[in-house]
């Protein structure tokens, strides 16, 4: 079993905010992507910027967006 990731409340809110834009049936895959990407970064501590970047990257290919559907996680 892979190790657990330690995230702050703010970082969890970032992930949950972006996850709202992901279809329910694809959220498990979305969260798995985030875990894999953060693990690949290889550090025990992640900044809010790291988590924001990964949250956006993990969405790639999971949803179709138009210019008016841009997700703001700032």
Image: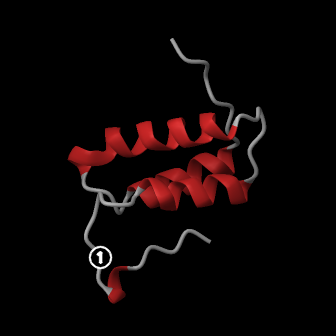
Relative to 53, is 68 on the left or the right? left
Relative to 66, is 8 on the left or the right? right
Q: Locate residue 56, reporting x and y percent.
A: 50, 62
Q: Residue at x 61, y 59 (%)?
A: 52
Which residue is labeled 1 in the image? 65
Q: Which residue is drawn at 63% across and 30% down?
A: 5
Q: How crowded is mark 1: few (under 14 residues within 10 Å), some or many (20 or more)?
A: few
Mark 1 element type:
loop
Q: Locate residue 64, reporting x and y percent.
A: 25, 70
Given residues 24 and 58, the one toward you in this image is 58
The residue lying furthest to the top in this view is: 1
Q: Locate residue 30, reporting x and y percent.
A: 38, 46
| Quarter of the image where one finds residue 21 | bottom left
Q: Locate residue 47, reporting x and y percent.
A: 76, 51
The quadrant of the image that shows the C terminus is bottom right
Q: Residue at x 69, y 32 (%)?
A: 6
Relative to 62, is 52 on the left or the right? right
The residue lying furthest to the bottom in this view is: 67
Up/down of 22 relative to 42, above or below = below
Up/down of 46 relative to 4, above or below = below
| Quarter of the image where one finds residue 70 | bottom left
């Amino acid at each position: 079993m892979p190790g657990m990731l330690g995230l702050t409340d703010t970082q969890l809110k970032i992930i949950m905010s972006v996850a709202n834009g992901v279809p329910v049936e694809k959220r498990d895959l979305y969260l798995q992507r985030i875990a894999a990407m953060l693990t690949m970064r290889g550090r025990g501590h992640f900044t809010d910027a790291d988590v924001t970047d990964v949250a956006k990257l993990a969405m790639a290919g999971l949803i179709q967006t138009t210019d008016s559907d841009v997700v703001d996680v700032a």
